[in-house]
Amino acid sequence: MNQDMQTLFQIAAIGIIVAMIHTVLKQMDKEDYAHWVTLIGFVVVLFMVVRKLNMLFSEIKTLFFLQ
């Protein structure tokens, strides 16, 4: 449970940092860079979620002896 909460806080921190950088870049009229930062943040979070889903499916396989 501790690692799950840590992952949630990491995703929240990435979201806050990306939102701040996006806002600063948009204020500086660098909207292209702002969109790239948002996309990169999304991809990082997506990889984190995919890793967690892979771990979940491995646990389910082990639970039901499908390995």
Image (cartoon, helix red, strand yellow):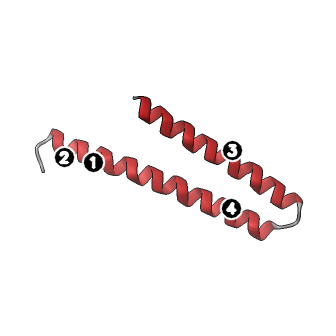
Which sits earlier in the primary sequence, circle 1 or circle 3?
Answer: 3
Percent of width and height locating residue 44: 54, 57
- Calculate the distance from the C-alpha at mark 1 to the C-alpha at mark 3: 29 Å
- Calculate the distance from the C-alpha at mark 4 to the C-alpha at mark 2: 36 Å
Pointers 2 and 1 in contact (C-beta within 8 Å): yes
Identify which residue, 37 or 57, lies in the foreground. Answer: 37
In percent of the image, x 17 and y 39: which residue is there?
63
In percent of the image, x 31 and y 44: which residue is there?
56
Q: Please, what is the three-letter code of the amino acid marked with disc 3?
A: Ile
- Calculate the distance from the C-alpha at mark 3 to the C-alpha at mark 2: 35 Å
- Calculate the distance from the C-alpha at mark 3 to the C-alpha at mark 4: 12 Å
Which sits earlier in the primary sequence, circle 4 or circle 1?
Answer: 4
Pointers 3 and 2 in contact (C-beta within 8 Å): no
Rendered image: mark on residue 37: 4
Q: Please, what is the three-letter code of the amino acid marked with disc 1?
A: Phe
- Describe residue 26's horizontal placement relative to residue 46 as left or right: right
Percent of width and height locating residue 9: 56, 37
Q: Which residue is identified by label 3?
A: 16
Vertical arrangement, residue 67 with respect to residue 63, above or below: below
Identify which residue, 6 or 19, lies in the foreground. Answer: 6
- Describe residue 56's horizontal placement relative to residue 26 as left or right: left
- Which one is closest to the eye, mark 3 or mark 2? 3
Rendered image: mark on residue 57: 1
Vertical arrangement, residue 40 with respect to residue 48, above or below: below
Quadrant of the snapshot with the N terminus = top left
- Which one is closest to the eye, mark 4 or mark 2? 4
Which sits earlier in the primary sequence, circle 4 or circle 2?
Answer: 4
Label 4 neighbour load within 10 Å: few <14, some 14-19, many 20+ = some
Rendered image: mark on residue 61: 2
Pointers 4 and 2 in contact (C-beta within 8 Å): no
